[in-house]
Image (tube, helix red, strand yellow):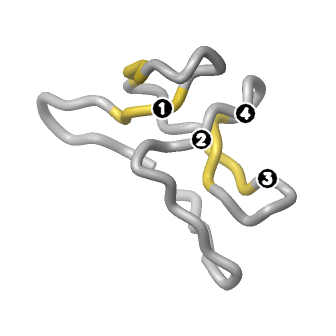
Amino acid sequence: MMIEGDGFFQVLMPDGNIGYSRNGQFTLNDEGIIVTSGAGYALEPEIASQKMQFQSP
């Protein structure tokens, strides 16, 4: 995903706090929730989809 202009993605950190990132590299976890690649932090608010399609530019 991409943010154009000012802004950040909100992610849920393991300690329950909200973290912020501009890195748009995400994937779906085993439960169908969009998470950061690598660390696996869920977007906040949580977004879940069973039939979401990603398209690379």
Real-space CA distance between mark 4 and mark 1, rounded to the nearest whole angstrom:
9 Å
Q: How far apart are the two marked residues, 2 and 1, measured between alpha carbons?
A: 5 Å
Looking at this view, is 53 or 42 the one in front? 42
| x 74%, y 24%: residue | 39
Q: Position of residue 28 (x, y in %)?
A: 73, 56
Q: What residue type is labelled 1?
A: Val
- Classed neighbour count for the residue bearing mark 2: other residues with Cα under 10 Å, few (<14), some (14–19), many (≥20): many
Toward the left, the furthest residue is 6
Residue 14 lies, with reference to residue 45, above or below; the image says above
- Indicate the amino acid at tag 4: Gly
The total of numbered circles placed on residues is 4
Q: Position of residue 37 (x, y in %)?
A: 71, 34
> How much space separates mark 2 and mark 4, taking CA atoms?
6 Å
Instruction: Say if mark 3 contacts mark 2, CB within 8 Å.
Output: yes
Badge 1, how many Cα within 10 Å: few under 14, some, many 20+? many
Q: Is residue 53 left or right of residue 31?
A: left
Q: Do the residues labelled 2 and 1 touch (CB within 8 Å)?
A: yes
Identify the residue at image location x=79%, y=53%. Answer: 29
- Lateral position of residue 38 relative to residue 2, left or right: right
Q: Which residue is drawn at 65% across and 20% down?
A: 14
Disc number for residue 40 = 4
Tell me if label 4 and label 3 are in contact, CB under 8 Å.
Answer: yes
What is the distance, in whole Å, between disc 3 and disc 2 at their CAs? 9 Å
Q: Mark 1 points at which residue?
A: 11
